[in-house]
Image: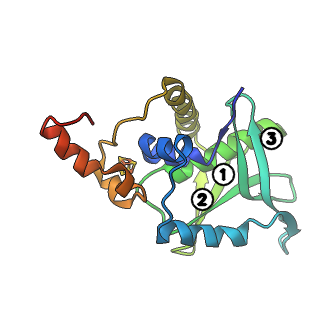
Amino acid sequence: MDYLPLSYINHFEYCPRRFWYIYVQGQMVENAHVLRGNLNHANVDRPGYATTDDAVTVHRRVHVVSHRLGINGICDLLEEDADGALCPVEYKQGQQGKWRNDESQLCAQALCLEEMTGRPIETGAIFYFGSRRRMTVPFMPALRQHTAALIRQMQLALAHGQIPPHTSQRQRCQGCSLIDVCLPTEVDLLTQLGLTQA
Ligand code: SF4
């Protein structure tokens, strides 16, 4: 079975077409936002662990997998308290956005960790470099179901074998680094003129 890299859940939820460009076609435009994110991540991505004064062990760059869901990937940082409770922490560029894609990616990590350890994971956290804020994410049943459904949709999209259509939520395109590859406005115009299909 092929395992999907869980970081792509983030792209898929943002826009399935964006996921296709990056995962299937290997397209990635390195704009300032992407480069800043890569640089910030380089500091987080040192493997190893340390224990804080609060007796929390911080594991960095933890490989995770779910055989049930067919995903694997990396957890940026995993906190483990003295009682063994686990809390995955994801680091993100910018500030908390309007979309839930960061939460779904984090939840996928938690689902992997639960399967690997047999321990329930109730919350995770996302640290946004832009705002320097840490947001707690409870792994409620709705988020778990939503994340599992996204993974299934990704697998179905790949099995379908065709690039997904443009997102109907065109405000997302303004924040997408692939807008100059995807050309949603131009394709809309050509479609209106009957010169191509969306
Ligand atoms: S430009 Fe818009 S439609 Fe195209 S990949 Fe990005 S978000 Fe999706």
Amino acid type for the residue under numbered disc 3? Arg
The label number, if any, that marks residue 136 in the structure image: 2
Q: Position of residue 119 (x, y in %)?
A: 80, 41
Q: Amino acid at mark 2?
A: Thr
Badge 1 local density, few (<14 within 10 Å), some, or many (20+)?
some
Mark 1 lies on residue: 123
Q: Position of residue 142 (x, y in %)?
A: 53, 37
Distance between the Cα atoms at labels 3 and 2?
Answer: 19 Å
Q: Are marks 2 and 1 in contact (CB under 8 Å)?
A: yes
Pointer 2 or 1: first along the chain = 1
Q: Residues within 10 Å of mark 3 (few under 14, many from 20)?
A: few
Instruction: Indicate the position of residue 127 as horizontal and vertical percent values.
Output: 60, 66
Q: Secondary structure at mark 3?
A: loop
Q: How far separated are the C-alphas under marks 2 and 1?
A: 7 Å
Which of pointers 3 and 2 lies earlier in the amino acid sequence? Answer: 3
Residue at 50% x, 49% y is 101
Q: Which residue is mark 3?
A: 119
